[in-house]
Amino acid sequence: EPPGDSITISINSENMRQLYNESKGRQVSLNTRINQIIKDHLNWHTNAPAAKMYYLPKSCITKVIDQLTELQISVLALDVARDFKDICLMLRGEFTISSFLDVVVNWLQITKTPNRRGQNMYEYNLLIKHDMGYKYSFLVKEVCRDVIDHTFHMEIEFIVTENTLGVKIMNINDSYQSSNILCSC
């Protein structure tokens, strides 16, 4: 039977000290930081291995991608885009534009990738600062294009630079309620 509104847990003193210092560095209470960790665990870490999501060093990814041509990157992006259906199903239980964007935003949060998001009645904007080079920007752009344009048939625009990718999805309200997209932000 699930517990009530709150529970008491024991944390050893070394872990408590580390959590306290981390929460202080992030300028949040210890309770808030522990709740963030639990949320990250439940939203991502619990199902990420089953969704075939793994950590790799940025330098490894960058070195591999930099060896590919734009055509090879586009082919790779098609495979990754196809995998997103399974990823979203494992992590969110559905494959919709909302669940796709929620997984992307959660991935950015988990990997501590700087980003900005904005939304109004007509468009959704996402700016990702990855510092991994043009070919990585191109790869992420192609994955987003394949999923958003080809799968969900939504109009999309990109700004691709050496270390940043801007994504703008137009006519966002035609496909779902806008409140669904920013729920995990």
Image (spheres, helix red, strand yellow):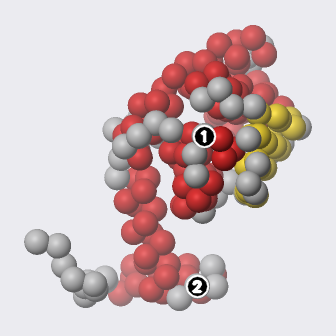
Where residue 164 appears, x then y in whole percent? 82, 44
Quadrant (top left/top right/bottom left/bottom right) for the C terminus = bottom right
Where residue 72 appears, x then y in whole percent? 70, 12
Q: Does residue 91 appear left or right of residue 139 in this picture?
A: left
Question: From this viewpoint, is residue 68 visible?
Answer: yes
Q: Give me the residue at 46% from left, 30% from top.
A: 85
State yes or no: discs 1 and 2 in contact (Cβ < 8 Å): no
Quadrant (top left/top right/bottom left/bottom right) for the N terminus = bottom left
Q: Give me the residue at 55% from left, 55% from top.
A: 180
Q: Is residue 58 above or below residue 144?
A: below
Q: Which mark is residue 28?
A: 2
Q: Give me the residue at 65% from left, 41% from top.
A: 174
Which residue is tagged 1?
Answer: 175
SS at mark 2 in the image: loop
Where residue 108 appears, x then y in whole percent? 62, 52
Q: Is residue 28 above or below residue 149?
A: below
Q: Does residue 29 appear left or right of residue 127 in this picture?
A: left
Circle 1: is it few (<14), some (14-19), or many (20+) Cα within 10 Å?
A: few
* Label 1 to label 2: alpha-carbon separation: 36 Å
Q: Give me the residue at 60% from left, 40% from top.
A: 175
Indicate the amino acid at tag 1.
Ser
Q: Which of the 4 quarters of the picture holds residue 23?
A: bottom right
Indicate the amino acid at tag 2.
Val
Q: Which of the 4 quarters of the picture holds residue 8?
A: bottom left
Where residue 30 appears, x then y in whole percent? 48, 86
Q: Which mark is residue 68?
A: none
SS at mark 1 in the image: loop
Q: Is residue 184 above or below residue 162?
A: below
Q: Does residue 6 appear left or right of residue 49 in this picture?
A: left
Counting residues from the start of the chain, the first of labels 1 and 2 encountered is: 2
Question: From this viewpoint, is residue 139 visible?
Answer: no
